[in-house]
Image: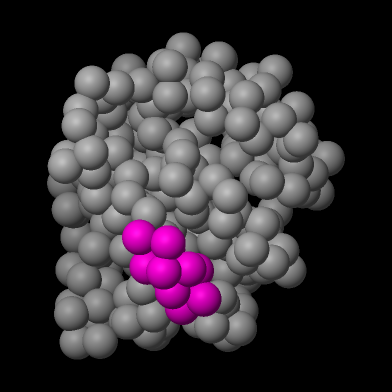
Amino acid sequence: MIIEPSIIACQFEHLAEEVKKVEEGGADMIHVDIMDGHFVFNITIGFPILEALNRTTEMYLDVHYMGYNVFDYVERFVQSGADCVNFHCEATENVDDVIDYLWKANVHVGLALNPETPISMVENYLHRVDTILLMTVNPGFGGQPFIEESFDRIEELRNLINFKRVRKRKVVSMDEDLDAFEEVDIRVDGGISDQNIAECMRRGATQFVVGSHLFKQPDYKAAIEALRGAGKVG
């Protein structure tokens, strides 16, 4: 199970310290939410913060772009240090073009879906992506409660992946043969806590974005261990 703190919920006046604390606490990667104020009703951070994160840590930077005009910005995401770019199917008609660019740049590809978007929307892209990011809250603001119907959506997506036997790239390399590929990951984002992580995992999720639940805890290491423990119990 991959635990990735969403830095949108951290204390921004101590950004470098917060990143170091979650890294030392056992987090696997850093989740970076970038919102444009149009696709979602909020504006967060931009390229300078992503570049600063890239200078601050060696951790994997998982960018989630909640915005329109994805292709206009994808090159800047790569140049700023993104190791993976998740973008929304609902926000662009250029899905294949964005995927093509990320593959050529040797950056992992994630497709994101809002809670009301049918799972079938990603079916034709499963063979071309590394991760599907399922929003388990309505995107735009942190601290929202987990949407219970998301459990069924996770399971539906996992069943679809298994049925199609879709496999992703194991590492970022264009030269690997098919034997080096693994199954597409399911990343869940929104309201994740030690109260629901086990059920998410049981239904088929493998990567867990944790924001407010983690950063409101006094001890990040203990909180991350509690999440892992809850997942193992499930």
Q: Is residue 26 above or below residue 44?
A: below
The quadrant the C terminus occupies is: bottom left
Side (left or right) of 173 relative to 34 = left
Queried whether the magenta region covers residue 158, the answer comes back as yes
Q: Give, as a single range, the part of the protein colored magenta.
A: 155-165
Residue 57, can we see it?
no
What secondary structure is the stretch in magenta mostly built from? Answer: helix
Q: Is residue 233 above or below residue 165?
A: below
* Identity of the residue drawn at 69% across and 66% down: 118
Side (left or right) of 126 relative to 34 = left
Side (left or right) of 170 relative to 40 = left
Question: For residue 84, what is the image quadrant?
Answer: top left
Queried whether the magenta region covers residue 112, the answer comes back as no
Q: Position of residue 37 (x, y in %)?
A: 79, 39
Q: Position of residue 190 (x, y in %)?
A: 54, 65
Q: Position of residue 224 (x, y in %)?
A: 24, 64
| Frontmost residue, 116 versus 233 | 116
Count of marks overlaid on the render: 0
* Identity of the residue drawn at 46% across and 39% down: 128
The quadrant the N terminus occupies is: bottom left
| Frontmost residue, 65 versus 176 | 176
Q: Is residue 142 above or below residue 83?
A: below
Residue 163, can we see it?
yes
* Identity of the residue drawn at 46% across and 78% down: 155
Colour setup of the view: one colour
* Identity of the residue drawn at 50% across and 81% down: 151
Question: For residue 141, what is the image quadrant?
Answer: bottom right
Q: Position of residue 231 (x, y in %)?
A: 25, 78
